[in-house]
Image (cartoon, rainbow, N blue to C red):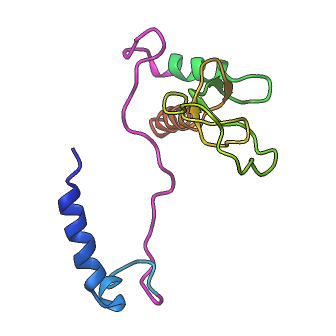
Amino acid sequence: MVDVAGLRKRYQETKALAPDQASKGSPLSPGAEKTDLPRYFALTERRPNAAGNTTERPEDRVARIIAAMDEWGRWKGELGTTSHPFKADGSREVAPGDFSRTQVGDDSDTSPYRAQGVIGISTSVYIRNMSELIRYLEGK
């Protein structure tokens, strides 16, 4: 559960600070010391594969991940959400209907909405697969 009252209190306290005091120690401040960042980010949790197998050998996981790429080297899958592509500015008239369940209005509304069967390149799948491949290479 989110502590909204606590967040509001911290926000008000920070807002009351002078700008130089609020940004003290920030790596983004002018003249701040260089902060070394990790070479890359990789997820540390291991998820089961589609069959629920978490004991798969690393070599088999890597082979499965590579085999899942299409001819262009992409991992495509069901996205879960999508949006209408921008066509033009929408109508100034409010579209009739209750959109509380669909999360999107007429076809000019570019808000994301849940959709089944929409296949594309998923950032979460890419990160999960690349993290697995990076962990494998680190072990070599």
Dominant secondary structure, magenta: loop
Looking at the picture, does residue 63 appear above or below residue 23?
Answer: above
For the point 51% across and 52% down, which residue is it? Answer: 40
Which residue is found at the position 31% from the left and 91% from the top?
A: 18
State the residue in front, 17 or 98: 98
- In the foreground, 53 or 60: 53
Q: Which image quadrant for residue 36?
A: bottom left
The percent coordinates of residue 43 (x first, y second) are 42, 40
Answer above or below: position of 132 versus 108: above
- 49 part of magenta stretch: yes
Q: Is residue 29 left or right of residue 115?
A: left
Residue 40 higher or lower than 75, as above or below: below
118 up-or-down from 44: above or below: above
Q: Position of residue 56 (x, y in %)?
A: 43, 14
Chain part drawn in magenta: 30-58
- Magenta-drawn stretch contains 50: yes
Picture mark count? 0
Q: Residue at x 77, y 52 (%)?
A: 89
Q: Where on the picture, by quarter, is residue 19?
A: bottom left
x%, y% of residue 17? Answer: 27, 86
Q: Residue furthest top?
A: 51
Give the side of residue 9 with respect to residue 96, left or right: left
Snapshot quadrant of residue 71? top right
The x and y percentages for residue 9 are: 19, 69
Which quadrant is home to the N terminus? top left
In the depicted view, which residue is nearer to us: 139 or 86?
Answer: 86
